Image (spheres, rainbow, N blue to C red):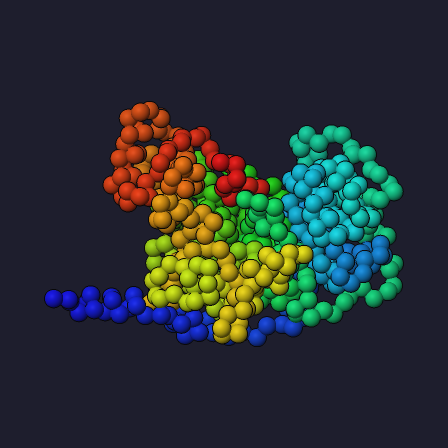
């Protein structure tokens, strides 16, 4: 006889959860279900904050603090300087910088003059920089002096007319600047090509007397920023984001990250060439009136010391950062009392690590619990976040206001049943405009469904439960199809990472003569464990207890570390 509970479960699992019903809104509490979004540029949203909090600190850089009013003045000066060198509306300006004041100032100045900011990693290779410049047709580039020679060489095969170079110590206090030059080991001055290169200071000085119009009014759906996909498995794609994308992210994340308020501070460790860093750690906090503590070069061993020194209310980072924090030898007991919100995104946070982070937070004086965020560069980095007081194991949380999530059968636009795996699709104001000069890729990723809406097909597998809470399982490209079975590497990794000897693991598909592909596990052991045959056998038997036979790793390879991309994600193409 079938029990009532079984009948209810069967009814739920055969129920098609319609995305437009938005059951996740039941957990919003005081968060409004709909927001009014600005119809203007990114810099104009910052103007609103400047008018409200002119004397509040906008950023701190090596102990030098700058108010919102002074930041805005610097942005205006940079905008005049851009117009002075000939920048026009819709020009592309490449910003090849770490988290420094010049990078932030230039980002908003580029937007102010109606140009588009092309954000790239300063540690990119010469050929990569050349690719990014040519991809965006940039005429101008801002770079660090430390990477000038590389940028100069890269620019020779591009349309670059002017290179602007900044020094890491340009915006430091005098004493900090002296100490920087004494300890950085950077002794040799660079030889500047005066024909097409100008220093930041001269660039600004030359624009002081510019008397023309330097502010451009743009629409919310105009191009504003180009960010690049991580490129873990192929050539990076340029992702075109609009004024609305960034402004919507600022409004949404402010409400979802309650209790964000003016005067709070955030450690800006995530790099600004990444949507997570630029959108969540810079534009959103500056919209609120928060202080951004700029960290140009992050060293994992210094994370705890940075928190103790700057006492931030918000910590925003990727799992590897928090793993470094809880493994640090910093012994100060209650140094996290200032921390009210902790957000992890950018990569999967396994349940064991999440539990350890929460225990560490409590032990060191914070009442915050880590909140898991989800998004991708194509959705301006964030569009889903676990609630403050409610968490389901393995979930990535609730969609942001005005953001719809639905799960479709892979390869189709047909919505799946509740709790059924499929491709995660997103519709909302943070969804990208297009890929840069990639019409086919854009068409394959942004699809109009039968409801008439444009949906971003994320390439991620997940499901939505009966309460509207979203769960992530794997990248579609990471699914291993072996003898007709779908194998999810993320699940195998989850099991492996729960073994007491395993620090971390990654599973990929490798070719097999008749099964097509089979899973292979790469494992990094914790430092206190020594690899031997006994431990290998133990881990293999452990997997056999928890993983279906068809999903078991075909091969186990032990490594001291796993290859990472420039933003700290696993570089699958190097395995």
Image x and y of residue 377, in percent: 56, 55
Residue found 56% across the figure and 63% down from its top? 446
Relative height, residue 510 to residue 8 (above, below) = above
Query: Does residue 220 appear in this view?
Result: yes
Where, quadrant-wise, is the N terminus in this rendering?
Answer: bottom left
Image x and y of residue 321, in percent: 49, 44
Outermost residue on the top side: it is: 532
- Looking at the image, which is closer to me, 414 or 492? 414
Residue found 64% across the figure and 47% down from its top? 99
- Looking at the image, which is closer to me, 184 or 463? 463
Is 74 placed left or right of 280 in the picture? Answer: right
Outermost residue on the front side: it is: 514
Residue found 42% across the figure and 62% down from its top? 409
Image x and y of residue 261, in percent: 53, 63
Is 191 placed left or right of 274 in the picture? Answer: right
- Looking at the image, which is closer to me, 159 or 320? 159
Figure quadrant of residue 18: bottom left
Image x and y of residue 330, in percent: 45, 37
Residue found 86% across the figure and 65% down from its top? 212
Query: Does residue 255 appear in this view?
Result: no
Is 297 placed left or right of 307 in the picture? Answer: right
- Looking at the image, which is closer to me, 425 or 64? 425
């Amino acid at each position: 006889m079938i029990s009532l509970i079984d009948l209810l479960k069967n009814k739920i699992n055969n129920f098609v959860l319609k995305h437009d019903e938005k059951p996740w809104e039941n957990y919003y509490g005081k968060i409004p279900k709909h927001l009014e979004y600005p119809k203007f540029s990114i810099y104009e949203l910052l103007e609103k904050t400047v008018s409200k909090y002119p004397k509040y600190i906008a950023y701190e850089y090596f102990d030098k603090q700058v108010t919102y009013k002074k930041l805005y003045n610097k942005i205006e000066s940079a905008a005049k300087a851009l117009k002075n060198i000939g920048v026009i509306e819709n020009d592309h300006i490449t910003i090849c910088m770490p988290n420094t004041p010049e990078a932030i100032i230039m980002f908003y100045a580029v937007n102010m003059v109606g140009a588009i900011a092309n954000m790239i990693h300063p540690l990119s290779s010469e050929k990569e920089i050349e690719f990014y410049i040519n991809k965006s047709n940039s005429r101008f580039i801002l770079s660090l002096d430390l990477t000038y020679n590389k940028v100069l060489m890269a620019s020779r095969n591009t349309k670059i007319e002017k290179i602007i170079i900044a020094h890491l110590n340009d915006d430091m206090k005098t004493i900090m600047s002296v100490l920087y030059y004494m300890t950085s080991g950077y002794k040799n001055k660079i030889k500047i090509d005066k024909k097409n290169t100008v220093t930041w200071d001269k660039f600004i000085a030359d624009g002081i007397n510019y008397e023309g119009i330097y502010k451009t009014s743009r629409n919310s759906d105009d191009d504003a920023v180009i960010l690049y996909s991580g490129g873990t498995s192929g050539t990076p794609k340029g992702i075109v984001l609009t004024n609305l994308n960034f402004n919507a992210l600022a409004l949404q994340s402010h409400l979802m990250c309650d209790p964000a308020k003016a005067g709070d501070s955030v450690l800006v460790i995530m790099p600004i060439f990444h949507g997570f860093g630029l959108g969540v750690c810079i534009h959103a906090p500056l919209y609120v009136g928060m202080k951004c503590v700029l960290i140009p070069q992050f060293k994992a061993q210094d994370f705890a010391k940075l928190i103790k020194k700057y006492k931030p209310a918000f910590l925003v980072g990727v799992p590897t950062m928090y793993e470094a924090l809880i493994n640090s030898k910093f012994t100060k007991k209650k140094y996290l009392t200032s921390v009210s919100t902790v957000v992890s995104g950018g990569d999967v946070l396994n349940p064991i690590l999440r539990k350890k982070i929460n225990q560490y937070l409590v032990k060191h004086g914070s009442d915050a619990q880590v909140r898991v965020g989800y998004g991708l560069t194509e959705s301006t980095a964030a569009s889903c976040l676990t609630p403050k007081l409610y968490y389901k194991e393995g979930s990535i949380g609730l969609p942001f206001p005005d953001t719809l999530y639905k799960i479709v059968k892979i390869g189709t636009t047909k919505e799946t049943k509740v709790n059924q795996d499929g491709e995660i699709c997103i519709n909302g104001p943070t969804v990208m405009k297009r890929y840069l000069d990639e019409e086919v890729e854009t068409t394959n990723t942004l699809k109009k469904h039968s409801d008439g809406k444009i949906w971003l097909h994320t390439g991620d597998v997940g499901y939505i439960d009966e309460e509207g809470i979203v769960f992530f399982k794997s990248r579609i490209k990471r699914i291993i199809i072996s003898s007709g079975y779908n194998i999810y590497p993320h699940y195998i990794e989850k099991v492996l990472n729960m073994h007491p000897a395993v620090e971390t693991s990654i599973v990929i598909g490798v070719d097999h003569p008749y099964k097509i592909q089979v899973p292979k596990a790469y494992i990094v052991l914790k430092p206190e464990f020594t690899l031997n045959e006994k431990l290998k056998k133990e881990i293999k038997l452990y997997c056999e207890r928890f993983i279906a036979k068809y999903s078991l790793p075909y091969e186990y390879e032990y490594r001291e570390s796993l290859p990472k991309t420039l933003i700290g994600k696993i570089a699958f193409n190097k395995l």
